Amino acid sequence: MKSFFQKFSVLTNSPGVPIVQLMQKFKIIGISGVGRAGKDSFYNFAKQILEEKGISSGRWAFADELKKDLDPFIQEKFGFSAFTEISEEKDYIRPLMVEYGKIWRKKSKGSHWLDKIRPQILSEEGPQVRFITDLRFAAFGETDEAHFVQSNGGKIVHIEKNIPINGTGNFETLGPANDEEKINDPKVKKIADLKFRWHHFSDGKEELGKKAVGDFLERNCRLWKI
């Protein structure tokens, strides 16, 4: 008897047109989008929804590996952790982290940070759905993170967020946080398998976010009645 996950299939926006029917033990989902578009929030809601259906999931992020590298230096020089959740501290160290990551990407043709998490992502042991929550690059072809996801049967979901324009009642798309995002986010968006757009929601209205993700998964995923 096939498990729920073995019957799980990702679809295009055209009803009934399968992209791929999953017969492997796990699925890789790369989440892309500019900073603060809600990539981690999307994962957190998706994780809840999948768990409610008996599907296990896990999170990986290239930025976590970068922060591990820089954390001792940042703690020694600045007195706080690279893993800080304080917005002001994040702003202080963001340029450093961007440039450090950029140097290693150029030196390795995109593979350095991917190589850090590749063994875990491809392990036979682990959750059924494996999310990479900060897929940002498709610049180096076969050695880059976007190609890794898609060449291993995974899918890229590109996220955009609508933010309110003060006092107008209208919305605009959240833009890139820096020049690196301005250059690279359109490249990933172009090759993304699925695109997701949602509104900014305030604290206390998280259920709206969960519903948006749930509706998206409902439109783009289904059970195969085998």
Image (spheres, rainbow, N blue to C red):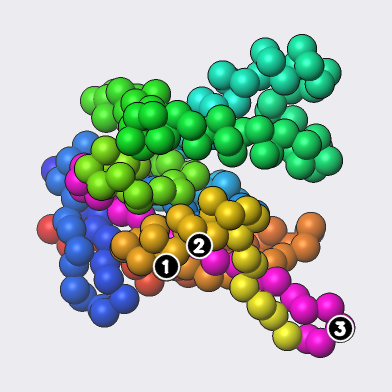
Mark 3–mark 2 distance (CA, rounded to whole Å): 25 Å
Quarter of the rendering occupied by the C terminus: bottom left
The reply to whether the magenta stretch includes residue 166 is yes
Question: What residue is at 20 percent from the left and 75 percent from the top?
Answer: 16
User: Do callouts 3 and 2 mark residues in contact (Cβ within 8 Å)?
Assistant: no
Q: According to the image, label 3 marks what residue?
A: 167
Q: Which mark is residue 159?
A: 2
Q: Is residue 201 left or right of residue 114?
A: right
Neighbours of disc 3 within 10 Å: few (<14), some (14-19), many (20+): few
Which badge, 1 or 3, is on the more N-terminal residue?
3
Residue 124 image position (x, y, % from top left)? 24, 25
The region drawn magenta spans 150-169
Find disc 1 in the rendering and name its residue: 195
Residue under the image location 68 percent in, 28 percent down: 83
Residue type marked 2: Ile
Label whose residue precedes the other's in the sequence (1 or 2): 2
What's the residue type where badge 1 is placed?
Lys
Q: Which mark is residue 55?
A: none
